[in-house]
Image (tube, grey):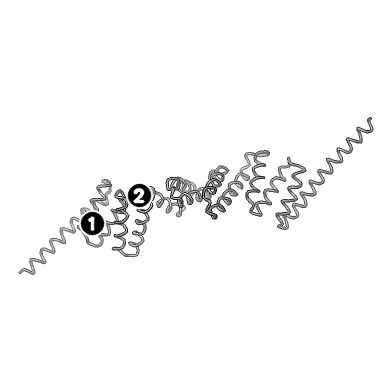
Amino acid sequence: MIKKSLICVILQVFCILSMQNLVICDEKLGDQFFKKGDFRRAAEEYTKAFKQDNKNGKLILKIASAYEKMKWYSQANKYWKIYLDDFDSADKEIKDKLAYSHRWIAYNFYQDGNFEDAIEELKKSIGYNYDFIDAYYWLARIYHELGDFENAIRMWQKVLEIDPKNENAKWFLKEAEGKFLYGEKSYKLYLEGYKLYENKKFQDSLDKYKQAYEENEKFVSAAYWIARINYELNNFKEAIYWWEKVIENDNTNEKAYFFLKESKRKLQESEEKSKQGNTGKSQ
């Protein structure tokens, strides 16, 4: 009886050692494939080893790394999540990898025009790294493109909170705020007006600004530019009308008060010169 028990123990030890050797062999083979850049076969060998030793955290990370190298992010995420759940839930490096990976999955959805799933992946990305600026940037961009300017504004603001010097985010935030406040069509006309003004096409610029104002009569900036261009073109009567429109909607606008006063003064000077000219002709 004792002899049989001893044989059983020896067999068990042999099996355990054999399994350990198999794990080591599969892992080492995986390492060799990984070094050669054959990440698919590396993942296969690591997975074989993991099936024999599913409590080995090092193997889980190696499998995830092999899938990451192949850009198979969904598979990489599966194993990184296992590692966080079973071994170290606070590992920042793994959380950062998950954030990065979800961002790439989101980008692929975005490229396919699947904005809904892209948004969900980006939210997961932020869940792993609250300060991951790329995730906020793409969330802002997608919301912007969908015309959801309220959410776009929140995301652009978050980008600037992390990177205050981000010029792209500053520009897009301003555009999102304009479209949210005044309407997408009105703000688009306003931007077109500004481009024409920069190219010194003043009359075309005026037309665009007027169209923007007609779309939304609360659009003070459009009224401001209509007044300003008329002032620069010496159309002082028209300028006065529009400066008064600006003040009507924004009675704290000091520039509007100043240019209204200047427009009235210059109109008066112009009318006096015109009278003097007419008097000289009659004589």
Q: How many marks?
A: 2
Which is more N-terminal, label 2 or label 1? 2
Q: What amino acid is found at the position of numbered circle 2 in the picture?
A: Tyr
Is residue 160 toward the left or the right of residue 109 in the image?
Answer: left
Say which residue appears at 22% left-offset and 57% top-offset. Answer: 238
* Relative image position of residue 79 (x, y in whole percent): 67, 45
* Relative image position of residue 212 (x, y in whole percent): 32, 54
Q: What amino acid is found at the position of numbered circle 1 in the picture?
A: Ala
| Eye-nearest disc, 1 or 2 | 2
Q: Which of these two is toward me, 192 or 87?
A: 192
Residue receiving disc 1: 239
Mark identifier at residue 182: 2
* Relative image position of residue 213 (x, y in whole percent): 30, 53
Mark identifier at residue 51: none
**Dot 2: what SS?**
helix
Crowd rating for badge 2 (residues with CA inside 10 Å; few <14, some 14–19, many 20+): many
**Dot 1: what SS?**
helix
Is residue 242 toward the left or the right of residue 28 in the image?
Answer: left
Residue extending furthest toward the left: 283
Residue 14 location, quadrant = top right
User: Mark 1 and 2 residues: CB-CB less than 8 Å, in contact?
Assistant: no
